[in-house]
Image (cartoon, rainbow, N blue to C red):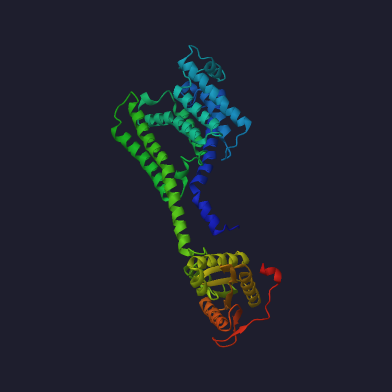
Amino acid sequence: MTVLPASMGQRVSAYGPALFLLYAQSVLALSALTIALIIGLTEIVGHVPAMFLSKGNGPHPLSVLSVSLFSFAILRRSPFKVQTWWRRGLFGLVLMICLVRLAEIFLLNTTPLSDLAMALYRDVPVVGIAMGANTALALGLFSLGALMRRWASTTAFVVTVLGLVPVSHAMFSYFFDMPGGYGAMSPPTLVLLSLVGLSQLFVFFRTPLLRPFLSETTWGRMARRQVAAATVSVFFLGTVFHGNDDTGMSGALLAAVFWLSLVILLAAGPIFERIEHERRSLSQEMHQQARRDPLTGLLNRHAVLAYIDSHTSVVGSMETVGVLLADVDHFKRVNDTVGHMIGDAVLRELGTKLQSKLRPSDLVARWGGEEFLILLPGATLEQTMNMAQVLRAAVASAVHWEKEGHTEAVTLSIGVSIYNADGTETLEKAIQKADTALYTAKSQGRNRVLCHEASGSAAEAKVSEVYRPKASALH
């Protein structure tokens, strides 16, 4: 079994709601396609209860055909803005059917398209049945949103939401028994439109208006709870106050309250997302400032102590660590001669030079004043001594300060020790040994590397003349 790294697992869990919508999108589209095909096929062959067919006030053939085409086009769509030509063709065909049907309702005196579609069925319904204006409007807006998504995802999302408005109106009307709000939309048609509408809506999980709802931030969780609360509240109000309304106004009012609440949350989402992003950025910046020396940009003593705590709490977490404690020779003379601004510039340049010679896994910190601590995880004593000589020679050859045309090189005295994670001593003790070696290097003339004698007393140190780096490593 593959185990995800902790950081990757955190990223996946952070997008949990979005992943859920992707799975739900395919399930909803497949459900709508399956139901529409079943209704269409049984209309042709018969042998099903009449309430599910056009002759029993069920979906019109145009509704079944449009839902089938649309749900097939959105089934297993890519979450990105990639659409094949045949998908766009199906969306365009559904939009054309809906526009012609709206023209039949509001402009024409005949219904040629509806009559042609009804002729495909096995039995012509006794009652006059046709694709309602709300159904045509909803499917048309869904198709238009799908076509626009490639170029303007936010606008396409708004168009899709508008398509759900007549669907929600009919849903509230059926739920609270308000015939005036059905909008000539049969119950099976309402189910089909709800499935394809939500499936199309879930495709927009990356749009700026919907993305805040799907995050695992405080705002995202709160927004999802508010949507749930608004839905429950609307149904509660409808249950208590709907009364006997044959005009459909109560259903329209309930739908308006629901969508008004949702629009307010949609509008507030990007604002709160930006606030949350700024808060996280500020928190990260403050965290970095707490760990970094403001002058050199290197890690500070606090960061080193945190590193020590996290890496030595378990014995054996690191085999060895090379420890170098470096101090700038006669740094007080720099400040007294040319001033603190030049002294600060020298420290910044020195920190940059030290970092340029180290591995990404190594740690360099300003330990205090003109002292620098370098930790080399996994380094042996020989490797640590070689690196100390590289750093000493590199600084002496590249870092300098000037006064009245006279250039003077900056040199380092470096104390070296080795930390072995065998439980016999701590990393803090190894740093103390390096400090002892540094003190001895200062007393013996400066500009040199001394290693703490592991087998001798705490005060002993020796000059390591045998560790000489290659000349190419000094530049």
Residue 190 on image: x %, y %: 45, 30
- 337 left or right of 84 in image: left
Q: Is residue 107 visible?
A: yes
> Residue, x 37% and y 35% (percent of image)?
260
> Residue, x 51% and y 25% (percent of image)?
63
Query: Can you say whether 225 is above or below 135 in the image?
Result: below
Residue 471 on image: x %, y %: 70, 71
Residue 350 on image: x %, y %: 57, 67
Which of the pair 181/359 is nearer the observer?
A: 359
Quadrant including the C terminus: bottom right
Residue 280 on image: x %, y %: 45, 53
Quadrant including the N terminus: bottom right
Query: Can you say whether 320 is above or below 355 in the image?
Result: below
Which of the pair 262/248 is nearer the observer?
A: 262
Which of the pair 268/315 is nearer the observer?
A: 268
* Residue furthest top in the image: 109
Q: Quadrant of residue 424?
A: bottom right
Q: Is residue 39 visible?
A: no
Q: Quadrant of residue 411?
A: bottom right
- 239 left or right of 106 in image: left
